[in-house]
Image (cartoon, rainbow, N blue to C red):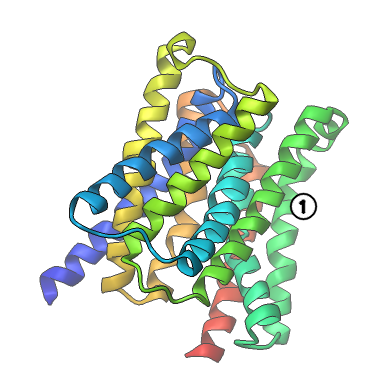
Amino acid sequence: MKKQIQGGYIALGLVSFLWGTTYIASRIGVQHMPGLFIAGLRQFSAGLILVTFFLAKGYKIPDWRSLKTISIQGIFLLCLANGMLTWSLEYISGGLAAIIAALVPILITVFSILLLKHAKFTKLMIAGLLVGFAGIVVIFSDYLNQFSNSSFAFGVGLAILSTICWAFGSVYGSNKKLPVDILFNVGLQMLIAGVIMLVICGFSGKYINPVHAGISSLYALLYLVVFGSLIAYSAYVFAISKLPPTLVSVYAYINPIVAVGLGWLLLNERMNGSMLLGTLITLGGVILVNREFKKQIA
């Protein structure tokens, strides 16, 4: 048991670091390929590998009702959330996108209260919500002059919508218990979402022949498939099975720190006092909301 718990901590460390690095890998990838196309290739490739593995082991495609639920989850979490987030990186930095995504735990709490009635708003929870959004305001105070640039504003809008979709999809999925192996479920979500995004890219013209993409973009895509999807998500599933969910949720606080640090180090992205202060304020609000929510459902 002790070894399994230690393994859970190692898996959590992998998730906290690797999911933070995917913002930088995606940022590198979109330099030569459309963001939605990268997201489609990433999910399709990872999904195909997982689904093929489980089918080879003798697993059967789930019934239509389960497949419908899996498809809805895949659309919200991967098509809309991951697709729009990767698309947003054509216009904003990976660090900024990661900070916006740090609001996910807050939004998950809000959707859980509104849709599942698992808890109710308290004064401290509302204070945490205000603190979290105040942190975002502090960060964006340094970007006010860039909002006159429609591309920047569009990228921020995509990142915010992505965060809302991820939170909603997570709450929706938490209420659906399916008779399907969790990794097989994830593989199907990835495969379905990848097909949908690639079809959209085909009709919209948002694609290129990967052979003509820069070598750095191809390496970034390979990194996203192997480390971002296959390894990190498997580690997340293992961690959540060995450690308390409240402990595993710490990854959401570490991802932005990794993304901002690596973006500054590798891509010369902006990192100044306002961004650091705003990030700390935002994470403080997220922690406060989560703590209050967990008190009620404990």
Judge by depth and name the residue closer to the eye, 250 or 165: 165
Relative placement, left or right, of 112 versus 8 is: right
Residue 122 % position (x, y): 70, 87
Relative placement, left or right, of 214 versus 160 is: left
Q: Using the rendered view, name the quadrant where residue 128 is placed.
A: bottom right
Judge by depth and name the residue closer to the eye, 220 or 288: 220
Q: Residue at x 73, y 85 (%)?
A: 123
Judge by depth and name the residue closer to the eye, 168 or 160: 168
Furthest residue toward right: 148
Q: Using the rendered view, name the quadrant where residue 118 is placed.
A: bottom right
In the rendered view, tell whether residue 79 sits above or below residue 208.
Answer: below
Furthest residue toward front: 64
Residue at image mark 1? 137
Residue 105 % position (x, y): 57, 66
Relative placement, left or right, of 143 versus 180 is: right
In the rendered view, tell whether residue 221 sits above or below residue 289.
Answer: above
Report the quarter where the N terminus lies.
Answer: bottom left
In the rendered view, tell whether residue 117 sits above or below residue 231.
Answer: below
Q: Residue at x 48, y 64 (%)?
A: 64
Judge by depth and name the residue closer to the eye, 276 or 14: 14
Q: Residue at x 26, y 63 (%)?
A: 9
Within 10 Å of disc 1 (Cα), the crowding (few <14, some 14-19, many 20+) is some
Q: Is residue 190 visible?
A: yes
Q: Residue at x 38, y 72 (%)?
A: 247
> Residue flagged by tag 1: what amino acid is it?
Val
